[in-house]
Image (cartoon, helix red, strand yellow):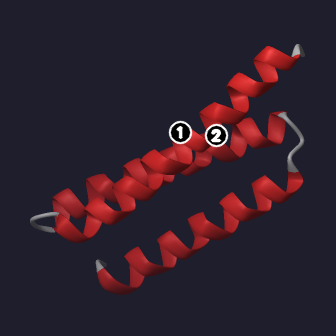
Amino acid sequence: MEETERQAKIKQIAQLRRRGEKAYDDMYEAHGFRDSDDRYREAKDCFYDAIRVAGELELKDEVDSLVNRLQHIKEVFRGQFS
């Protein structure tokens, strides 16, 4: 993989993380369970995609960080919105 492609993927991970965090924040502002559930799914999708890309780049620490954050988001949703 070329360095420019690698850097693009690293930027993609950061963008996906930001989108996932925004969806997580928006989950609290949602009106009703359906909206909260939609934001939750969006957050999960972003984090799963970021985990996949980080795995492709063999960024173990980044994968671990993303997995831990996703687990936290899942626990919060299940505890507060289910």
Q: Residue furthest bottom?
A: 79
Q: Give the vertical position of 69 relative to 34 (above or below).
A: below
Q: In this orientation, which residue lies closer to the viewer: 20 or 15?
A: 15
* Mark 2 surroundings: few (<14), some (14-19) or many (≥20) residues within 10 A: many
Instruction: Please name the residue that numbered disc 2 is placed on.
Output: 13
Amino acid of disc 1: Gln
Q: Quadrant of residue 10?
A: top right
Residue 37 horizontal/vertical position (percent) = 28, 60
Q: Residue at x 53, y 39 (%)?
A: 15
Quadrant position of residue 22: bottom left
Q: Position of residue 28 (x, y in %)?
A: 25, 71
How would you rate the neighbour count of disc 1 (Cα within 10 Å): few for under 14, some for 14-19, many for 20 or more?
A: some
Would residue 11 be found to the left or right of residue 22 on screen? Answer: right
Q: Is residue 26 above or below residue 59?
A: below
Q: State how many labels appear.
A: 2
* Residue shown at 63% from the left, 43% from the top: 50
Classify residue 76 as left or right of residue 8.
left
Disc 2 vs disc 1: Cβ atoms closer than 8 Å?
Answer: yes
Q: Which of the labelled discs sits on residue 15, or is there none?
A: 1
Residue visible at 55% across and 49% down?
17
Mark number displayed over residue 70: none
Which is more toward the observer, 22 or 27? 22
Q: Quadrant of the C terminus?
A: bottom left
Identify the element where label 1 is drawn: helix
Left or right, residue 27 beside residue 76: left
Furthest-left residue in this view: 31
**In the figure, is residue 64 to the left or right of 29?**
right
The residue nearer to you, when weighing 73 against 4, is 4
Give how far apart the Cα atoms at labels 2 and 1 are: 5 Å
Q: Quadrant of the N terminus?
A: top right
Residue at (81% x, 42% y) in the render: 55
